[in-house]
Image (tube, rainbow, N blue to C red):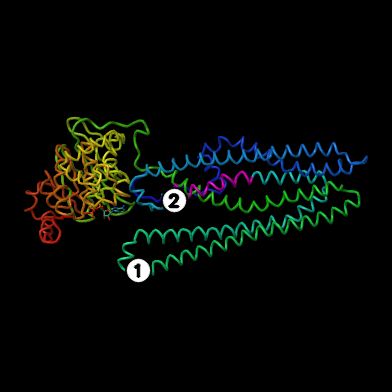
Amino acid sequence: MSAAATAVTAAAPRQGALATLRRGLRTMPEFRRGLPATFALALVATAGRVVVPIAVQQVIDRGLLAPGGPDLGLVRTLVLVCAVVVLVTGVAVYRMNVRLFRTTETALAGLRSRAFRHVHDLSVLHQQGERRGSLVSRVTSDVDQLSTFMQWGGVIGVVSLGQLVVATVVMSVYSWQLTLLVIACFVPLAVAVRWFARRLQVAYGIVRERVGDVLAAVSESVVGASTVRAYGIRERTAARLDRAIGRHYRAQVDAQKVTAAVFVSGELVAALANAAVVVVGVLLGLAGEVSAGTLVAFLFLVTLFVAPVQTATEVLNEGQNAVAGFRRVLDVLDTEPDVRDPAATGAARELPPGPLGVRLEHVTFRYAPGARAALDDVDLALAPERSYAVVGETGSGKTTFAKLVTRLMDPTGGRVLLGSDRAGWVPLTEVAFASLRHRVGMVPQDGFLFDATVADNVRYGRPDLTDEQVAAAFEELGLGDWVRGLADGVATSVGQRGESMSAGERQLVAIARAHVAAPDLLVLDEATSAVDPATERRLTHALERLTEGRTTLTIAHRLSTAERADEVLVVDAGRVVQRGTHGELVDVVGPYARLHASWRRSSAGTPDRVG
Ligand SMILES: Nc1ncnc2c1ncn2[C@@H]1O[C@H](COP(=O)(O)OP(=O)(O)OP(=O)(O)O)[C@@H](O)[C@H]1O
């Protein structure tokens, strides 16, 4: 599959609801494992429910109204049997629920973790193509949506169906006339339930949409809190949020009205069926067709009819939710990772030992089929242990170049190789991820930090390092005084996404992280943000130490970086148009001289940005 971004939703062909449910359940072997035993318990629970009406009939007809006077011994035995059956049913229902919760949670945890790993396997580009919030919701709330159905809907649905069948069988054994009567009463309800189910689907569809609106409004106002405050638009933002909450409230109430209507209809039909059974039953009794016990048993059996028909609406509704949830989760799992670890196929190679150079052979990259090439037929070689500065106008393709060299994406044409003439070259697509991540390091522009201590962030790629070793690494980079000046030294917490640190400080931590990882090839995306002169000096010094003796590819935004580099590569509209030292290029008429001149013009404002 090409590296071009394809939305996750486009990956799988649409399947029918049942096929989706079946396929979804197949992806959760943990769920199917305990299912037969759970169904056996469900069967016991169902059977237990019809034992009581049968016993009542027996107590009345053969115990209390026995031809030779009341048979109290039989009544006692039947009451005892009933008590045991009720107890066993209770235990079975309890065990069934516990088993169901356990297997469902195990299965969902497995699914969540598989889906999460899969999202990680998708390329960076793909993760950007899909809105991140949406990917997160697929692994969290969409999976949660399945849980109600699996814990409750599926098995309760089957139990209810079983209850209906068993109740019908028992009733028809007692009296086919009364059975037909009860069914006749419930047919309109069954039809109404289908109608209600459609209305519920629409109503809850609107509720889910409104929930999304509320979440979007809340997250936007929280993320943009400073902008909201700065422009004094608090009232407007709050009003927008209130409107979203109000719409959600109305949608929720509308949906609940439909649910309430379903239950009321159930109650009405049950009352109607009871009344009909009493009237017709008494008439049949007078004609000698049914006994008093049968009539009372029927009243019990009618109640067994109501619950399943009512639950059917909810089961249908939950089933529809689950199908929607499964679709969204399966879409993620069905998406083939476009940057695959060759180790998964067993054909992976290690990078050759020693210093690493880079070779690009006719490399082309398009972000989408038919889009303009972000890199266009680039053919070049970078020697090991030298430093290169990649410069160019904004949007010229510098970041794309860096992402292809670190295999965050694969080229749509041509290939990238790492190695050296001495030790040999290996195409990046054949290099095991473990070897690649071990030998190739990247310091991204934003210097993302995890919510942990400075030391934890530094040893991300080297978990074996102690705090002392991390502190020593800062010393080696000339950052000892800075780290000692932090509240708790290397044990200082950086806050969520590193928010307790300034942009420059985050870069220092990111540099230390790259330093302890000690890669042979280092790709640096130079930060564009201006930092204070003291941090700037620290950064420059630390970067010098970090890049010493390593092949370094820097996406340079500062002229000083370009000046210091062994060679400058000038990228323009996806092509490398100039190459040489700063001294060689600066006096030649061309893009570099233009960039340089524009830097000179703006040098009064920003220190030394070149691209
Ligand atoms: N995720 C993306 N999807 C689609 N097009 C993209 C994507 N990222 C970059 N591009 C396009 O590819 C081209 C090269 O972008 P790239 O990010 O490599 O430029 P750059 O030289 O690094 O720019 P800057 O200096 O602003 O970071 C640009 O035209 C950009 O619009």
How far apart in space, not on screen, are marks 1 and 2 (Cα)? Answer: 29 Å
Q: Which of the 4 quarters of the picture holds residue 224? A: bottom left
Going by the picture, which residue comes out furthest to the right? 68
Tell me the quadrant of the picture where the C terminus can be found. Answer: bottom left
Give 473 or 111, whichever is nearer the viewer: 473
Residue marked by disc 2: 137
Q: Which residues are magenta?
A: 138-157
Q: Nearer the viewer, residue 55 or 29?
A: 55
Magenta segment includes 165: no
Query: In x, y percent, where is residue 546?
Result: 17, 40
Amino acid type of the residue tagged 1 in the rendering: Ile
Residue 432 higher or lower than 147, as above or below: above
Give the x, y percent position of residue 534.
14, 51
- For image coordinates 91% across by 51% down, the residue present is 287
Residue at the spot 29% in from the left edge and 31% down from the top edge: 349
Tags 1 and 2 touching, CB below 8 Å: no
Judge by depth and name the residue closer to the eye, 52 or 180: 52
Q: Secondary structure at mark 2?
A: helix
Whether 269 is drawn above or below 385: the answer is below
Query: Magenta includes 141?
Result: yes
Residue at screen point 14% across, 53% down: 533
Residue depth check, mark 1 versus mark 2: number of the one nearer the observer: 1
Q: Earlier in the sequence, mark 1 or mark 2?
A: 2
> What is the three-letter code of the residue carrying label 2?
Ser
Query: Considering only vertical position in the picture, is 513 above or below 214?
Result: above
Q: Residue 233 got which mark?
A: 1
Q: Quadrant of the N terminus?
A: top left
Say what secondary structure mark 1 lies in: loop
Q: Main secondary structure of the magenta part?
A: helix
